[in-house]
Image (cartoon, helix red, strand yellow):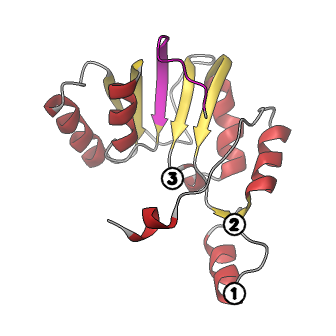
């Protein structure tokens, strides 16, 4: 969906990478150099060990930093990747601040908690309003992206088994 070309070398930042599951897949799949960012050094240590074990350490460099204070230069990345993390600083804030780091024609790939229906139990509404007031429907998240100057390529929801199977 991101339209990445397997024949092109990319510079990618995986923001809020945790222990690096996405970084490892990207490094194994694409010709790329990845900066994997998390604010917990212990997670980055796990990623470094895993990258070495599968011989991908030369493609992945880790950076212990906060996603709302990244030391990146403007226009320095082809792809910004963030799975399950942008909510930590807020979707609108994250996409706006991170846009400066993308090269012209660069791609932002993020996952975001969203409502999949307009009708929900009040208990869920109350919980999420307290926990993450930016929760909204995918169509409204697309509008936030458009207002920030992005051209959304699409979205998908995770299948139920992704939430229920370990």
12 horizontally vs 125: left or right: left
Front: mark 2 or 3: 2
Q: Residues within 10 Å of mark 2 (few under 14, many from 20)?
A: few
Mark 2 or 3, nearer chain start: 3
Residue designated by label 2 = 116
Query: Percent from the top left, x then y, of residue 162?
Result: 44, 62
Front: mark 3 or 1: 1
Residue designated by label 1 = 121
Query: Percent from the top left, x then y, of residue 48?
Result: 22, 34
- Cα distance in 3D space between marks 2 and 3: 16 Å
Residue designated by label 3 = 84
Instruction: Write the start and end of the magenta stretch as one range.
Output: 2-14
Whether residues under marks 1 and 2 lie with C-beta atoms below 8 angstroms apart, the answer is no
Q: Secondary structure at mark 3?
A: loop
Q: Residues within 10 Å of mark 3 (few under 14, many from 20)?
A: some
Whether residues under marks 2 and 3 lie with C-beta atoms below 8 angstroms apart, the answer is no
Q: Is residue 8 magenta?
A: yes
Q: Is residue 18 above or below residue 73?
A: below
- Cα distance in 3D space between marks 1 and 2: 13 Å
Q: Is residue 109 above or below residue 164?
A: above
Residue 146's mark?
none
The answer to whether residue 64 is seen in the rendering is: no
Q: Residue at x 54, y 57 (%)?
A: 158
Q: How many marks?
A: 3
Mark 1 or 2, nearer chain start: 2
Q: Nearer the viewer, residue 61 or 67?
A: 61
Q: Secondary structure at mark 2?
A: loop
Q: Nearer the viewer, residue 2 or 52?
A: 2
View extreme (left): residue = 53
């Amino acid at each position: 969906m991101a339209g990445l070309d397997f024949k092109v070398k990319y510079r990618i930042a995986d923001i809020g990478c945790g222990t690096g599951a996405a970084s490892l897949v990207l490094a194994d799949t694409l010709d790329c150099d990845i900066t994997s960012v998390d604010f917990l050094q212990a997670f980055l240590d796990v990623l470094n060990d895993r990258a070495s074990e599968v011989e991908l350490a030369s493609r992945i460099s880790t950076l212990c930093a906060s996603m709302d204070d990244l030391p990146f230069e403007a226009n320095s990345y082809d792809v910004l990747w963030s799975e399950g993390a942008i909510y930590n600083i807020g979707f609108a804030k994250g996409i706006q601040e991170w846009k400066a780091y993308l090269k012209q024609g660069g791609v932002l790939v993020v996952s975001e908690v969203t409502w999949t229906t307009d009708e929900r139990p009040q208990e869920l509404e109350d919980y999420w309003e307290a926990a993450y007031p930016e929760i909204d429907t995918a169509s409204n998240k697309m509008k936030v992206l458009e207002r920030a100057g992005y051209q959304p390529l699409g979205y998908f929801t995770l299948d139920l088994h992704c939430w229920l199977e370990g």
